């Protein structure tokens, strides 16, 4: 709250938390930090709708089932033949071997695998995303502050297994009432595709501690992966009129629009905010 990140946020004591979120009954709580800034979209709905909108309004052509084999503008070699281009932006995600692997290796990019759950409708509306103190110890906005050291030391004693598996809590509610709950973090060039039952139990245990509720039934489980490296993201220019862009902190869905605006603006020397 003493930094610029706290602008517009509010600290709620236990009584205020109970008034604002009467359906939550945390097992142990001193209150909550509330942020009015956060928004969420349902990715599985938003991404195909966004692609359809771009195709309809701007004539963007999406080449499905097509692999990029080599990128060297003015030519991109693909599995469907060459493309003539003015410039190229390569966003490989966690594909570490197809394009510019030497750059990714030099940057120390590996993979992070995370376990995710969807739970049934709890019967009330959450109102905002919910996180727990494990998240405060993980995300740099909090974890880099001197005050976080005492919290980290406490959690090392009381939640050592959760920290070992990179477990922290994020709960968001979808339009249909179901809850998306995560997550854990395991690192390696080829992380296991299997979710351990114990990891799921740790996530649900944290859910129940933070909400004071029995977890609704699990309706979906999945493993997500992303490219991970020191720092939040990087941009390289491995060839002429080419940019390699990788978000290495798991925040790609949150930051992609701003990053895209800056990269395309720099490549073409335009301010996209001035375009119609």
Image (cartoon, rainbow, N blue to C red):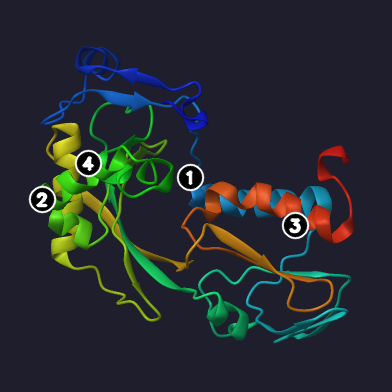
Nearer to us in this view, 20 or 3: 3
**Visible in this render: residue 120?**
no
Q: CA distance from mark 2 to mark 3?
A: 44 Å
**Disc 3 crowd, CA 10 A, few/some/many (<14, 14-19, 20+):** some
Q: Is residue 243 above or below residue 155?
A: below
Q: Which residue is mark 4?
A: 150
**4 or 3: mark nearer the eye:** 4
Mark 1 secondary-structure assignment: loop
**1 or 4: mark nearer the eye:** 4
Q: Name the mark on residue 42.
A: 1
Q: Which residue is mark 2?
A: 157
Q: Position of residue 105 (x, y in %)?
A: 54, 81
**2 or 3: mark nearer the eye:** 2
Of mark 4 and mark 3, the one earlier in the sequence is 4
Of mark 2 and mark 3, the one earlier in the sequence is 2
Q: Position of residue 162 (x, y in %)?
A: 18, 55
């Amino acid at each position: 709250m003493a930094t610029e990140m706290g602008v517009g946020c509010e600290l709620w004591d236990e009584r205020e938390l109970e008034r604002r979120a009467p359906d939550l009954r945390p097992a142990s709580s001193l209150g909550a930090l509330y942020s009015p800034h956060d928004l969420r979209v349902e990715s599985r709905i938003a991404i195909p709708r966004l692609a359809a909108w771009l195709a309809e309004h701007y004539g963007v052509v999406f080449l499905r089932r097509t692999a990029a084999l080599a990128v060297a503008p003015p030519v991109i070699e693909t599995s469907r033949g060459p493309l003539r281009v003015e410039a190229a932006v390569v966003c490989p995600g966690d594909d570490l071997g197809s394009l510019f692997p030497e750059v990714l290796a030099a940057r120390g990019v590996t993979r992070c695998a995370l376990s995710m759950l969807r739970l049934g409708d709890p019967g009330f509306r959450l109102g905002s995303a919910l996180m727990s103190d494990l998240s405060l110890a993980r995300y740099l906005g909090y974890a880099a502050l001197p005050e976080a050291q005492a919290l980290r030391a406490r959690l090392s004693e009381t939640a050592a297994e959760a920290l070992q598996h990179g477990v922290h809590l994020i709960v968001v509610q979808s339009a249909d009432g179901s809850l998306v709950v995560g997550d854990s973090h395991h690192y390696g060039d080829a992380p296991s595709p299997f979710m351990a039952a114990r990891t799921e139990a740790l996530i649900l245990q944290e859910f129940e501690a933070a909400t004071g509720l029995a977890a609704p039934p699990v309706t979906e489980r999945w493993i997500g992966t992303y490219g991970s490296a020191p720092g939040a993201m990087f941009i390289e220019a491995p060839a002429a009129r080419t940019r390699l862009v990788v978000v290495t902190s798991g925040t790609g869905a949150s930051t992609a629009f701003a990053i895209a605006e800056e990269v395309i603006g720099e490549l073409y020397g335009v301010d996209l905010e001035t375009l119609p």
